[in-house]
Image (cartoon, rainbow, N blue to C red):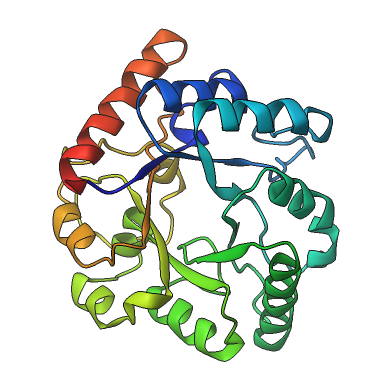
Amino acid sequence: MRKLALHQITMMDGGPERLLRFAAESGLDGICLFTASPLDANGIPMFPVVAAEAVNSFKSLLRDHDVRIINAEYFPVMATQDVAAYLPAITLAAELDAKRLVSHIHETDRHRAEDQLLRLCNMALDHGLEVGLEFTGFSAGCNSLDDAVALHGRVNQPNLKIAIDALHLFRTGGTLEQVQAVDPAIIGYTQLCDGPDFRLSGDYLDEAMNRMIPGEGVFPLSQLVALLGPHVDIDIEVPNFAGPSGSEAKTWARRAIIASRDLSD
């Protein structure tokens, strides 16, 4: 059975500490959480983060529960800022022994996007971290699997890996055949969720925040997982922001975990 990690947006209630404890109780090996959060329209962080002052206690929790941070979010390449601003959050991720940072490419100037991603890779390497390059329909600088593979080749850094999120793959026109054609060694992780159809979409934000339990939609998830090398981390990312909270949120997360285990055996 492959090792699985639970993404923070699958179970938001209680923040990073509750996520960690729940993942351990559920027999998972990892979690994906935020050491830096995107901001909403009012400049307020959208997601709870691990606070710098809590790093020692959180490290103890990780050690005591034998859980590792697979992905630390969120380190996008933006036109409006330099990736150097992420240094405190990168340092925090490294102190927590995270495996990698997650980045989307919103910068549309190709040369600046490459330069900024290269700088992010170098900063990550200095801290013993990988960088996961996620393509999405919302990140104009890298919005398809083909774009991600091409950008990976141009930046050409050993710690840069491509992420394959099932929703983003199928909503941006990606196929299993395209995944199969990618060098398996450059794929770092995949994110499991499901969807009701294979339509292309330039606007699927609501669906991205309210996904289906793996196996309850039409995405060929078993085939997708079968194409991935054994080194590829599997992240359970099934947010339901319009739905459950409290104890119901745990029930939702358990359903996502059970379904993902069935697909990953």
Q: Position of residue 80 (x, y in %)?
A: 80, 65
Residue 224 placement (x, y as % from top left): 21, 61
Q: Residue at x 46, y 28 (%)?
A: 241
Outermost residue on the top side: it is: 247
Q: Nearer the viewer, residue 116 or 28?
A: 28
Residue appearing at x 58%, y 73% in the figure = 159
In the rendered image, residue 137, in percent from the top left (x then y), is placed at 45, 63
Front residue of 2 and 34: 2
Residue 48 visible in rendering: no
Residue 29 point in image, percent of width and height: 41, 38
Q: Examine the rendered structure and indicate whether residue 79 appears above or below residue 4.
A: below
* Location of residue 158 (image quadrant): bottom right
Q: Quadrant of residue 39?
A: top right
Identify which residue, 201 or 73, lies in the foreground: 73
Image quarter of residue 102: bottom right
- Look at 58% across and 18% down and name the residue there: 14
Q: Is residue 155 above or below residue 167?
A: below
Q: Is residue 217 left or right of residue 152?
A: left
Residue lying at 69% horizontally and 46% vertically, measured from the top left: 38
Q: In the drawing, does residue 106 fall left or right of residue 195?
A: right
Task: State left or right for residue 86 relative to residue 21.
Answer: right
**Is residue 184 shown to the viewer in this render?**
yes
Residue 249, compared with residue 238, is above or below; it is above
Number of numbered discs on residues: 0
